[in-house]
Amino acid sequence: MSKLHKSPFALNSVCSILLVEDDENHAQLVLRHFDRAAKGQMIVTRADSRASAFELLANKHYHLILLDLSLPDSPLETTVQSFCDKFPDLPIIVLTSSDDLELAQKAIDEGAQDYLVKSELSGTLLVRSIAYAIEQKDYSLELEKSNAELQRFASTVAHEIKNPLAVIISFFSILKRRHGKELSDKTMRLAEGTEARARELSQLITELLNFARFSPELELFEVDLNSIIEDTLASEKTKIWRKKAVITLDNLPTVTCDATLIRQVFQNLIDNALKYSDQGAKVHIGVEESLNHWTLSVSDNGIGIDDKSLSSIFEIFKRAKNVGEIPGTGIGLAFSRRIIQYHQGRIWCESKAASGSTFYFTLPKQRKITT
Ligand code: ADP
C-alpha cells in the first residue's frame, strides 16, 4: 500500500488542485467553497481552457483535476478522454450541471473518479470528494501495477516451470509402465514418491497461475454482511464445534460488494482464526464506520504472528514461522488481498506472537458521494 502513503491527506501536506473552468462565475463559486472549507489545506490553480490546463499539468505536479466538461477548445464529449489519455495517473472529478448527468456518468465510465453537480456544491462535499477520489485513484494505480507484475510472473512460471514439470511427470509414468518390472521395490517406491512430489508441485503452480490470472468482473449489489456471516458460520459449523469456539458478532452494515467474493474473504479469515487458535477459541467479527468506508475485522486469541512475518503473510505461499504442523498452503490471504483490492479497499493484520491476531479490511461506502 505504498501509494496510499503518497496521498497528501495521509501525509498531512498541502494538496494542489487544478480547476479547469472557463466560466468566470462558476470558477469564483468553486474557489469560494475552497476558501471556506479547505483554507491552507488545498492550493487551487485555475486554467480556463484545455490547452492552458495541459501546459500547467506538464510543468507541475497536481494531486487532482477538477474538470468542467465544456471548454472553449475541447468538444464536450471528448474532454475527459483527452485528459485521461494524456495524464492517466491523475484523479479527475467532473463538474457538471444537473441536466448533464448522462454525460457525467459517461465521464466516470471513461476514467473520472467522481462527478459533482455545480448547483449542489458545498465546501464539505468538495473536500470529501477530493480526498476520496485521490484515495481511489491510488488504489486503482496500485492494482494495475501489481496486475501487470503478476501477469508477467505467471507467463514466466508457465513456460519455465510448468511445462518442464509436465515432461518430468510423463517420464515417470513411462518409466513405471515400461520398466516397472525391472525396478526393485525400493527404486519403484522412490520413483513413485518423486512423481507424487512433482504432481504436488504442479498443482501448486496451477494454483499460483489461477491466482495470477485472477481478474474478476465484480458483480456489485447491495449486500447485507450479516447474511454473509450467517452463511459462512453455517459452513464452518463443524470446525467451530471441534474447536469449542465462541464467536461474537457486531451488527454489520449493508454494503455494495460482490457477495461471493466477500464471502470468500470472510470464510478465509474465520477459517484461519479457528485453525490458528487452540481449543476454546474466541473469535470476534467487528465493524467500525468511517467517513468514506467501513472497516471490518476478524480477531482471535490464537497463536498470533511475529512482527517479521506480518509484512509478508499477504504474499502468495508465505507462512509465518510459528505454524508448526498446522496445514496450509499460504494462498488464502493472497487471494483475499486481491479481492479486497478489486473492491478498492485494503487489508492488513495487527498481531503479536502468542497473543492473537486481528485482520482488518475496508470496503468503500457508495462511490458517488451525495450530501
Ligand atoms: P494458510 O493458512 O493456508 O497457510 P493463508 O494465506 O490463509 O494460508 O495465511 C498465510 C499465513 O498467515 C498462514 O500460514 C499463517 O502463518 C498466517 N496466519 C493467517 N491467519 C492467521 C491467524 N488468524 N493467526 C495466526 N496466523 C495466521
Image (cartoon, rainbow, N blue to C red):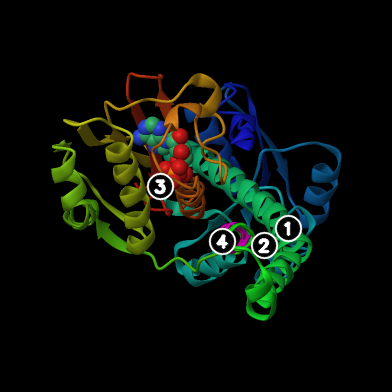
For the residues labelled 4 and 2, say whether their Cβ atoms are less than 8 Å apart: no
Q: CA distance from mark 1 to mark 4?
A: 55 Å
Going from the N terminus, do you reach mark 1 or mark 3 first? 1
* 170 lies above or below 260: below
Going from the N terminus, do you reach mark 4 or mark 2 first? 2
Q: Is residue 66 magenta?
A: no
* 67 lies above or below 218: above
In which quadrant of the rendered image does the N terminus lie? top right
Q: Which residue position holds label 1? A: 83
Q: Which residue position holds label 4? A: 196
Q: Which region is colored magenta?
A: 191-206
Q: Amino acid at mark 1?
A: Phe
- Rendered-image quarter of ligand 1: top left
Q: CA distance from mark 1 to mark 2?
A: 5 Å
Q: Which residue position holds label 2? A: 80
Q: CA distance from mark 3 to mark 2?
A: 24 Å
Say which residue appears at 60% left-offset and 47% top-offset.
137
Say which residue appears at 33% left-offset and 19% top-offset.
355
